[in-house]
Amino acid sequence: MSNRSCAVAGRFYPRDKETLNELLSSFIKKGVKKYNNAIAVVSPHAGYVYSGKTAGMVYSSVDIPDTVIVLSPNHTGLGYPISLDPSEKWETPFGWMESDTTLLKKIKQEVHEAEMDTSAQLKEHALEVQLPFIKMINPNAKIVPITVSGLPYPLIQKLGKALAKMILEAEKSTRKRPLIVASSDMTHFESVDSAKRKDMEALDRVKEMDTKGFLTLIEQKDYSICGVYTISTAMEAAAEYCRLKSSKPKVELIDYTNSGMVTGDTDEVVAYAGLIISSD
């Protein structure tokens, strides 16, 4: 099996370990509310100078367990609709991270449509930019890297149920619940007001855990939320997990920012949301 080297270090985030550590330390906040029952989070994936504040709020608000399922959108068009990356190790400036290849194989057994594939992540940034946050907070964390694109709702539901089953099994055997990270930015290249209006409309569907409504809204109105399938999969996984545990999911928006807050350009921004999906 191959290892996956950094593809966007030095562009989306610092390659130098000390510089990166200093930057992430400014994003990770102490004393913020902790969501001990978190099942999934939504974290942005732009360059850290733009979205690092929101990502930092997300990672400050949860404990990072030893297994993190990272759902990545596909910006390159390479690979399959569901690509399970079999790379055994992933490079970060903080050192190599291991992948939980055993869980990847279990997902493949449950979801036959998924393919073992490294091409989807060859040049992809959306998954890679999550790793330094995870590695810094929990150096022992293993990842389960999944890339999703263009999925119909039944397949999102199938993948979500498979992930919920894996989380429940892992929780029973280790007493530690794996965490899902859905990597996504929000509306792209519109005014601040337009982006916020569209994003809040979409996030209302997420807060209601209405996966079909969320998908339909974005697909019919052609909203530019790049992680529509990562967020949808996380929603379905959380809903199924809560159903199996006889609990209810709760969604909270903990941060919402945009690139204009850094650049000063409010006419054409990319927006970023930090979300926590937890069980009651």
Image (tube, grey):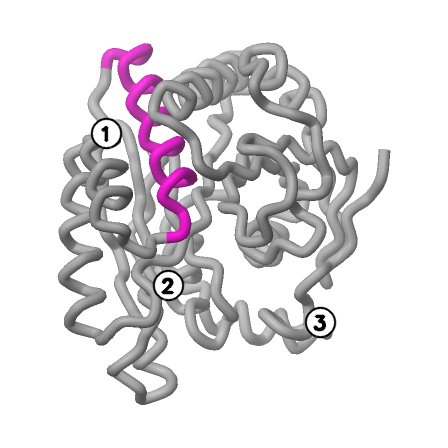
Residue bearing mark 1: 212
Determine whether 31 is above or below 40 in the image.
below
Q: Nearer the viewer, mark 1 or mark 2?
A: 1
Q: Splitting the image into 4 quarters, where does residue 271 fall?
A: bottom left
Mark 3–mark 1 Cα distance, whole angstroms, equals 39 Å
Q: Residues within 10 Å of mark 3 (few under 14, many from 20)?
A: some
Q: Tally the numbered discs.
A: 3
Which residue is labeled 3 in the image? 15
Between 192 and 241, the residue placed more toward the observer is 192
Nearest to the observer: residue 192 or residue 79:
79
Q: Distance between the residues labelled 2 and 3?
A: 20 Å
Q: Is mark 3 on a helix, strand or loop?
A: loop
Q: In this view, does 215 lie above or below 60?
A: above
Q: What stretch is highlighted in magenta?
A: 226-246
Magenta segment main secondary structure? helix
Q: Is mark 1 on a helix, strand or loop?
A: helix
Which mark sits nearer the N-terminus, 1 or 2?
2
Do tag 3 and tag 1 residues touch (Cβ < 8 Å)?
Answer: no
Whole-percent x, y for residue 142 in the image: 65, 37
Residue located beneath label 2 in the image: 54
Q: Is residue 154 magenta?
A: no
Q: What residue lies at 68% left-to-right and 67% top-to-bottom? A: 9
- Seen from the viewer's position, the closer of residues 250 and 29 is 250
| Nearest the eye: 210 or 189 | 189
